[in-house]
Amino acid sequence: MWRIIPEKDFCAAMNMALDEAIMERVRLGADPTIRFYSWNPSAVSIGYFQGYENEVNEEACRSSGTEIVRRITGGGAVYHDRKGEITYSLIAPEQIYPSEIAASYEVICGHIVEALTSIGIAARFSPINDVVINERKLSGSAQTRKKGVLLQHGTILYSVDVEKMFSLLRVPDEKMRDKLVKSVMKRVSSVKEQNPRISRGELGQALFHAFTKGKKWRRGDYLPEELSRALEIARIRYSERGWTTQR
Amino acid sequence: MAETIYKVHGGKMLRAKVCVEDGKIKDAMITGDFFLHPEEDISKIEKLFAGRPIPLDSKACVEALSLELSESQLIGASTQDIVTVVSMACGE
């Protein structure tokens, strides 16, 4: 039976650590889990393979109180605005999903497509790992598999401030910054931009229903032992500068 | 240390940072927003280039890398893309 944990907010290190702590328990036979969360304070997460100095404007993050964390999943740099998105993590035995990772992205991202469609946004899955409307990105996801357990996490943009995002991230060519911001504004959208009448709460409900549809599930919460294990993982890994700046 | 960036057509961004000494790659670091499963196999990719003379024998590198990653899943880039970005970083 799936455990579904409704949205709560945590700091960046704790959000990433909770994913690992739950993966450990699922590996030992605990129920698969879907959790929804937000980031408090706002944060930048970078993919496992990304170069820290290439991707993050550390000074801008520090002065704005934006945390920085390196994920265990690949993919790109993401700005997680505290109120601008909803993030999900799905943690399950990997045999539930296709062994081919590209195919499993389509299955799990399909829940996001369903949620957005249910609130009147004609989204579609765009390989490898995005959900788009009219070729404009509303959601991105990243997946890892470790010791038989799959973790896929991703964001669904409720509202986006592209200029704020780019103030915190580095661009490949500073001379191209303005052009890049304009280009990204054309290629990224948000639920609020598509329909200002949809509230963040309605988006959250739509996601909850779409991710639970067809599953046996129960509403749950973090166990005390998960929270304490996550605190330990946050301390030894995600809060460590060595981990964050390793590449 | 030389660095270059390469956008895979229809895929992800790759960056290669290489250190060349005495006409050979001393070490190489590959970064980017691609996916590799398992993630630890990034070390296999980077170790493959260490000690190789430049200019790189691209065909041999692609073959060796493909063999090294035969049990892995590389998503958003190909072994050819990785060899290309390393070659570019070496000034080719």
Image (cartoon, coloured by chain):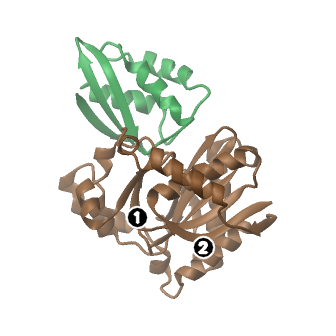
Chain colours: A brown, B green
- Pick the quarter of the image with the C terminus of chain A: top left
Please indicate whether residue B15 sits to the left or right of residue A75 in the image.
left
Question: Which residue is disc 2 drawn over?
Answer: A116
Percent x, y for residue B12?
43, 45
Mark 2 residue crowding within 10 angstroms, few (<14) / some (14–19) / many (20+): many
- Pick the quarter of the image with the N terminus of chain A: bottom right
Residue displayed at 54% across by 84% down: A198
Q: Secondary structure at mark 2?
A: helix
Percent x, y for residue A238?
45, 49
The foreground one among B54 and A29 is A29
Residue type beneath disc 1: Arg
Question: Which residue is disc 1 drawn over?
Answer: A187
Residue type beneath disc 2: Leu
Residue displayed at 26% across by 63% down: A167
Chain at numbered mark 1? A
Q: Is residue A162 visible?
A: yes
Q: Is residue A214 visible?
A: no
Q: Is residue A237 above or below residue A40?
A: above
Q: Are marks 2 and 1 in contact (CB under 8 Å)?
A: no
